[in-house]
Image (cartoon, helix red, strand yellow):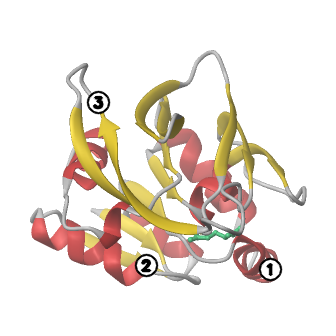
Amino acid sequence: MIGILGLQGDYAAHGKMLDALNTPNRVVKKTEQLAEIDGLIFPGGESTTLIKLMDAWDWWQPLTDFAAKKPVFGTCAGMILVAKSVANPPQKSLDLIDIDVERNGYGRQIDSFEDTGAFRPDGQTRAMPMMFIRAPRIARLGEGVEALAECRGDVVMARQGKVLVASFHPELTDDLGVHRYFAEMVGV
Ligand code: GLN
């Protein structure tokens, strides 16, 4: 069972992608529900709002404990939450993967765009449509972090152990590749 953190943002769209893969999934709105899932998606949205909700409902420790044991996948604002460090402006994060991110890193002129990127999860590269919405940019990739996709010269998807991140929104196109990859990581 894959959980989708349902505090704020476009969590419902992830459920549709997992449904299309026949992967059992549920929205997670209470910390107790973490005990019932095998992997967790942090959806896009607004990271400052997510941080306020995580503060208000004491999500930090339960999420840290969960990620120590089970796979997580952060997209866009979700990637900001799981990164080691955040700039523009600096804000706290869960520090689950050794990357630094810059919020809204694609600037105002092109703050939202769709493009074709290169997805290469298993050594074989294929084209993938990618949607960026006020997206964070990965500014630094730690040594133990594997790049899994690129777009416009930037790494836009990466993995370190049980932690997967993407700066784009794979749930907003009809390409199921990224969700299939995460479902395989979770083993469901
Ligand atoms: N710009 C947002 C943030 O900084 C992220 C946008 C998104 O998730 N699409 O939190």
Ligand 1: does it lie within 8 Å of the C-beta at label 1? no
Residue 187 appears left or right of 162: left
Residue 24 appears left or right of 51: left
Q: Residues within 10 Å of mark 1 (few under 14, many from 20)?
A: few
Name the mark on residue 11.
Answer: 2
Q: Does residue 88 lie above or below 108 as drawn?
A: above
Q: Position of residue 115 (x, y in %)?
A: 37, 56
Residue type of the residue flagged with mark 1 = Lys
Q: How far, Cα to Cα, is label 1 from label 2?
A: 17 Å
Residue identified by numbered label 3 = 120
Name the front one of labels 3 and 1.
3
Q: Position of residue 161 (x, y in %)?
A: 48, 28
In the image as oriented, which residue stretches furthest toward the front? Answer: 109
Residue type of the residue flagged with mark 3 = Arg
Tell which of 131 and 89 is nearer to you: 131
Q: How far, Cα to Cα, is label 3 from label 1?
A: 35 Å
Residue identified by numbered label 1 = 52
Callout 1: SS: helix
Callout 3: SS: loop
Q: Residues within 10 Å of mark 3 (few under 14, many from 20)?
A: some
